[in-house]
Amino acid sequence: MATLLLTAVGTAVGGPIGGAVGAFIGRQADQALFGTSRQGPRLKELTVTTSSYGQPLPRNFGRMRVAGSIIWSTELQESKNKQGGSKGKPSTTTYSYSVSFAVALSSTPIERIGRIWADGNLLRGAAGDLKVAGDLRFYPGKGDSRVDPLIAADRGALAPAFRDVACVVFEDLQLADFGNRIPALTFEIFSENGETISVSELVPSAEPSQGNAVLDHARGYLDEGGSIGSTLATIDQVFPLVCTTHASGLRLESAYSVSEEIPILPEQVSIRDSEDAQERHKQRGGRIGSEPIALRYYDEERDYQPSVQRALGIRPDGRQVMVDLPAAMNAQGARQLANSNAHRARWRNEHVIWRIGELNPDIGPGHLVRLPNAAGIWLVKSWEWSDFGVELSLDRVSPEILGELVSDSGASNAPADNPITPTQLFAFEAPAGDNSNPTDRAIFAAATSQSEGWRGAALFIEQGTALQEIGQTGSSRAVAGTLTVPLGTSLCTHIEPNADILVHLNSPDLAFQGTDVMGLSNGANRLMVGGELIQFLDAQSLGNGEWRLSGLLRGRAGTEPSALVGHDMGTSAVLLDDRTTTLNPSTIPASQSLRIAAIGLADDEPVFADLQNVGLSRRAIIPIAPLIREENDGAWKLCWTRRARGQWTWPDGVEVPLVEEQELYSVGYGPCEAPFVAWPLDEPQLILSQAQRADLLANYGPGQIWVKQIGSYGESPPLLLAELT
């Protein structure tokens, strides 16, 4: 505001020169009244990986989050996968890309790497698991680092080993999740110096400190280059230092390290002045408003994002100071440092010049002393010879702040670190869908896992000792599990409201959803239990992945024979929805003994599943509605209604289309496997006279009359028509 006002006034009075002078004075006034001064190197808002010549590599101490620089890379590698193309369906070719590259992280050795972020999402979790396909190798930056074999294969004999540079090498990192480009990467690194950062580590030529020159509350520090002096100046704003020279070299110590015995200075040397010597050289409150009010740092609890903690107390008017410290710490430690820093700065406003007759070699800059007949502790800042003796420049040391301050890091939208768990696989044939091609098999793979961090798996078919890839599952886990108690039989005639199924899902976060009768009629909640297709109305969670499904409609889509048998405990139960994977039938041989395999990121070995219900999707459906009509002459007219695969809704109530090559039936008397008598028919009826029935009883004894529909790919189960006794 003052800048605008004084610029206008200066221009009106003195023209362009007056305007410039007014603007300068106005900026000074605005800064004094409203400005916040920032001291120290500017903290970066999570910089990302770059590849620029001449860019210095930072020195890292403790734990930090860094971006690094790409120092080697290959071209993108393209892979293609062709799917479909059977029975008139168009084929689909998908392309995927991968790349290999190396990233330099630090010019100082580091012990290990932790999490890795790619475009803000986790590429590598805290457990060391990569979230996408690829390999990762880590080199700690020692002087004896070996040449990476992949770089050596690419660059030959001139391949560098990048010794004394900590780096990682990605091999064949899949880029589908990152728009087919190298993502913006940041790395969590852990240096060898552990959880304590000593100031002497930052200055290679300094003596090891005596244990008191430690960055309190800081568990990591980032030095991005520049002079050592500027680095120490930044640290000195928060952790006051004293630099002294000794016979052995440079020594850095904390300016406020209190020893057990603090010497007392002698009385001042009197001077020939009428003014009181002590009061003449004592200044109080000379720098009010200049104390730092806040500290910016990298917050561990917010994934090392820059955060601010402010000191307690009334905010002074005028310019306020905020210190940027490139250190990693938690919110409570940063709040403690910010408050201690401001508290210390306020007490430093009390300054004393103390004259003594001779110099004591045991008292010098950085030492703590007491004054005779005065309270408090004073820090010797400097000394100087004068005409009246030795003048010591003293600053008052702030009293210790007792207790700990409570603080909060604030909200953080950190990406979830879900572990990648092994794949669980189910493979089966299911009844053909509505209006599906009657010549195609409906083969499904249901892949699931315990954690939602599972990213999908590649599917294969076993061919002898080899595996042939047949597709991908996608990243959505199927809702699949097993029965925890046996499931009894059912006549499949109506909804059974009191019947239920107990299912255990492999992951507690997977869930079933309830529906209503209209939902059932539209095909909702279809559950494949063994060889039976069941629909359910209600779903109740019992905790720990246990579910109770009730209101059952059994034997759907021609699976009544399985419902008449029931199911044992441990039978697979898979929800048929868009999370199951439909397999291309042209890639699956028509074999009774076949295994499907899946390989995910967490699968050390292929996960196999036997293909269940082989032939179910094309087998002829059992006829329904058996009827006996007795004619006037006593003959029996046995009738039934045919069914068609894929025609489940039956909207008009008339005969369904014939999906087989021709309409054929086999009616038999006696055992289904080896009937005494069989009648091949091409229409859904059989007439038996009284004499024929008498002959059957006389020749073969009592027995059952049944019918099977003959389909293009096999017979249906038998339907009981009548019984002769």
Image (spheres, rainbow, N blue to C red):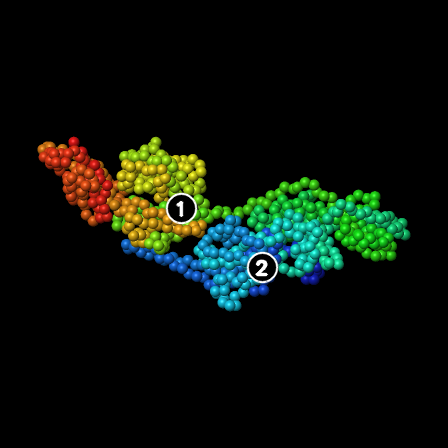
Question: In this picture, is 502 found above or below 209?
Answer: above
Compute the Cα span from label 2 to label 1.
Answer: 42 Å
Query: Which quadrant is the C terminus positioned in?
Result: top left
| Towards the viewer: 390 or 92 | 390
Place residue 58 in its image quadrant: bottom right
| Location of residue 669 with respect to 93 vertically, above or below | above
Instruction: Provide the secondary structure element on which disc 1 rests.
Output: strand
Q: Position of residue 586 (x, y in %)?
A: 30, 53
Residue displayed at 46% across by 63% down:
75
Residue in front for this viewpoint, 290 or 26: 290
Q: Nearer the viewer, residue 133 or 606?
A: 606
Name which residue type carries label 1: Gln
Tell whether 83 sits left or right of 235.
Answer: left
x and y, in percent, of residue 61 in the image: 61, 54
List the residue tagged with mark 1: 424
- Residue underneath mark 2: 142
Helix, strand or loop status at disc 2: loop
In this image, 551 relative to 380: left or right? left
| Image depth: mark 2 or mark 1 in front | 2
Whether residue 522 is visible: no
In the displayed structure, would residue 602 be above or below residue 494? below
Q: Position of residue 703 (x, y in %)?
A: 17, 35
User: Is residue 619 something that shows in the picture?
Assistant: yes
Instruction: Specify the amino acid type for callout 2.
Output: Lys
